[in-house]
Amino acid sequence: MKMKDFLHLTFKEYEGNPIIAPPFPSPIIADPTFVTPQESPDGKWHLFAHSLLGIHHFISDDGIHYTPLSKLTIRNAMRAFVYHEDNTYYLYYEKIKPYILWYSWLPHTWFSYIAMRSSHDLYTWSDERTILTPSLPWHSNEYGKSVSNPCLVKHKNTYFLYYSAALTHIQDCGFNEPLFIGLATADSPAGPFQSLQDPIMTPSKYNRWCNLGCGSFKALKMDDGFIGLQNGIYWDYTINQSGSAILVYSSKDGIHYAPLMKDPLLKPDIKEGSYKRSHVYAFDIKQVAQHRWYLYFNARNNWHWTKGKEHIGLLIGNNTH
């Protein structure tokens, strides 16, 4: 599939959204990543997402109706990404300090790193391996030290690890979101990874959809380059509130990305009572059939942390050409 073919996909929300609600007592379920039946060892759909407690594992027969496993997969972890190669599943995630989400708004308190566990069956996981720690000046600021939102893509014989770094405070939400997008490379999915010296994406006051922070980033390897998707964090001056929407980019080399679509693929609807009223956040996307793509995402229904809840929804892309 070529980059221009991605533009031929027509995306529509699943009419039964949202499909996964936050597990008690957490007000959020966020940052989904998934394995299709074609990739899984048992022919089922497997989805991983995090609450305030850690990373949960959900299983489905149809990709719509998911059942959670009773046991938490990884505690004190968030923003996972699953990568499959040679009968091995690699689960990358942001490892955080216990209970940090409850007081993350305090200055200089946040510290996180990217870790990985591997599995052959998606149920039993290896011991944790540290993949990337905050090591460059732009990985840190007054809010703490952070590398997060891993996404692994193989390009020829090199593994590209896209990640978010540093934090920016979202005033009307009362919490922080990722500031930059970085890239690290390795010869193996297990590393060691070497970061590029500078971020590959930064927010800009001139960017309508990314003027506060860069959120998360996912890349798709195409026949003639890369498709990049990002949930940009922005201040919407028309309503004087923050937002987050999914943007689409393209790249020839996987390093330098330019906007491919003028408008977001998916954005908040600002409707009272909507599960995606305020923000559309991180996601994972895969081709699930010859002419069909699934994009799972999480969305927020209100701005401030004391009021908002986050659910997981599904966006379905069909090739109509």
Image: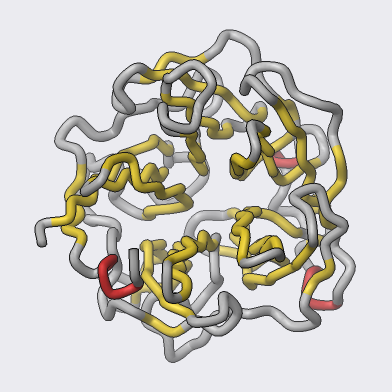
Q: Would you identify the image quadrant in which residue 80 lies? A: top right
Task: Find the residue positioned furthest to the left.
Answer: 320
Query: How far across and how far down the image is residue 172, in percent?
Result: 48, 60
Query: How far across and how far down the image is residue 73, in percent?
Result: 67, 22
Question: What's the residue at 42%, 77% (across, down)?
Answer: 250
Q: Is residue 206 left or right of residue 136?
A: left
Q: Is residue 257 left or right of residue 153?
A: left
Question: With respect to residue 41, does 227 lie above or below?
Answer: below
Question: With respect to residue 300, does 257 lie above or below?
Answer: below
Query: From the image, which quarter does the C terminus lie in?
Result: bottom left
Q: Is residue 41 left or right of residue 166?
A: left
Question: What's the residue at 28%, 41% (across, down)?
Answer: 289
Query: How far across and how far down the image is residue 225, in percent?
Result: 47, 75
Question: What's the residue at 48%, 36% (across, down)?
Answer: 34
Q: Would you identify the image quadrant in which residue 141 lies? A: bottom right
Task: Find the residue positioned furthest to the top.
Answer: 70
Question: With respect to residue 113, does 229 lie above or below?
Answer: below
Q: 160 or 158, which is in the foreground?
A: 158
Task: Find the residue positioned furthest to the bottom.
Answer: 206
Question: With respect to residue 180, does 245 lie above or below?
Answer: above
Q: 250 or 242, which is in the foreground?
A: 250
Q: 8 or 150, which is in the foreground?
A: 8
Query: How far across and how far down the image is residue 111, in percent?
Result: 83, 52
Residue 3 in view: yes
